[in-house]
Image (cartoon, rainbow, N blue to C red):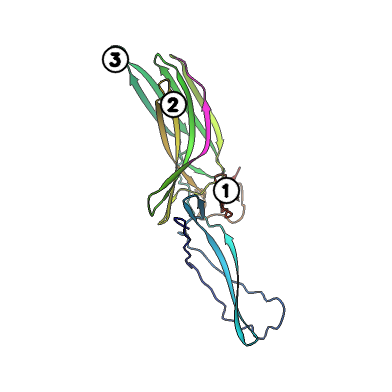
């Protein structure tokens, strides 16, 4: 679905060669085996459009010397595998903003850190930060957001939304505010991806609001994955100490009846 119009494409087809003319009346069960390519784009629903998968069953039958067609469909959720790398070490960024005349330089020093820049949906992330206000004016406040960006590849139109957000208070001149362990559990999310239709990426952003209203921003790119480093494919069943569930995202477009499910880590 793109640009207010729906385009349909058959990506897999399987038919049965069996002849059921002698089956008589009653229920007849037919088994099919459809295997999606691992490169199939992840299901998506947004105000820019989306990617939707349906399994459609078509039956052709004869009645009263005429051929008839009956169809039934069922939507499914597809998650393109995206594996965590082996090295998911902590990521830290910092900045120093200077203000004032040459003889009297004042600074605001800020640092933002996250336990890992590669995370699973449902995983707990530890966010740390520090702001030193060495100016003569108060800092109004601090906001930390995980921002989801979605871009439609056809026309580069883009939307953003906050996945989560928390705030820290004002900082008086000459004072420091630090936090070492702000724990946040990531909700169910589509993984970071880029395909011919859409691109999804995430950014952890800290905004420091100065007394003048100007914002100082620190950013860390975050990659959302759906498969642990020791797995080669998305698990269909829970196993060992690693458990997963299929969940709707909290950022689902409420105007749509289609709600894809995403593989989410269960702590």
How many other residues sit within 10 Å of disc 2, few (<14), some (14-19) or many (≥20)?
many
Outermost residue on the left side: it is: 102
The alpha-carbon separation of the residues under discs 1 and 2 comes to 31 Å
Using the rendered image of the protein, determine whether residue 61 is visible from the camera's viewpoint. Answer: yes
Q: Is residue 31 depicted above or below 223 in this figure?
A: below
**Residue assigned mark 2:** 208
Label 3: state its secondary structure.
loop
User: The magenta stretch spans which residues?
Assistant: 161-172
| Circle 1/circle 2 CB separation < 8 Å | no
Outermost residue on the bottom side: it is: 65
Q: Residue at x 27, y 14 (%)?
A: 102
The image quadrant of residue 23 is bottom right
The alpha-carbon separation of the residues under discs 1 and 3 comes to 52 Å
Q: Give the numbered dot on residue 101.
A: 3
Q: Where is residue 180 in the image (x, y as percent from the top left)?
A: 51, 27
Q: Position of residue 19 (x, y in %)?
A: 61, 84
So how many labels did they put on this image?
Answer: 3
Outermost residue on the right side: it is: 26
Q: Position of residue 135 (x, y in %)?
A: 39, 15
First along the sequence among labels 1 and 3: 3
Q: Which residue is drawn at 52% across and 28% down?
A: 167
Left or right: residue 23 compared with residue 3: right
Foreground tag (1 vs 3) = 1
The image quadrant of residue 16 is bottom right
**Residue assigned mark 1:** 254
């Amino acid at each position: 679905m793109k640009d207010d119009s729906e385009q349909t494409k058959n990506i897999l087809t399987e038919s049965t060669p069996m002849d059921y003319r002698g089956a008589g009346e009653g229920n007849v069960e037919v088994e099919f085996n459809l295997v999606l390519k691992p490169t199939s784009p992840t299901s998506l629903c947004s105000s820019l459009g989306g990617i939707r998968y349906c399994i459609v069953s078509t039956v052709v039958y004869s009645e009263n010397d005429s051929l008839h067609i009956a169809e039934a469909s069922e939507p499914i959720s597809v998650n393109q595998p995206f594996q965590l790398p082996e090295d998911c070490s902590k990521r830290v960024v910092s900045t120093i903003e200077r203000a004032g005349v040459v003889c009297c330089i004042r600074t605001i020093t800020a640092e933002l850190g996250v336990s890992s820049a590669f995370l699973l949906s449902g995983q707990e992330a530890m966010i740390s930060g520090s702001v030193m206000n060495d100016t003569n004016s108060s800092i109004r406040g601090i906001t930390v957001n995980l921002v989801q960006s979605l871009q439609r590849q056809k026309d580069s139109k883009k939307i953003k939304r906050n996945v989560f957000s928390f705030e820290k208070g004002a900082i008086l001149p000459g004072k420091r505010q630090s936090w070492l362990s702000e724990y946040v559990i990531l909700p169910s999310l589509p993984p970071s991806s880029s395909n011919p239709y859409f691109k999804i990426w995430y950014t952890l952003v800290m905004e420091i609001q100065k007394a003048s209203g100007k914002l100082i921003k620190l950013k860390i790119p975050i990659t959302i994955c759906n498969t642990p480093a020791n797995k080669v494919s998305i698990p269909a069943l829970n196993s060992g100490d690693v458990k997963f569930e299929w969940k709707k995202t909290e950022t689902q477009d409420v105007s749509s009846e289609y709600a894809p499910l995403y593989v989410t880590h269960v702590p």
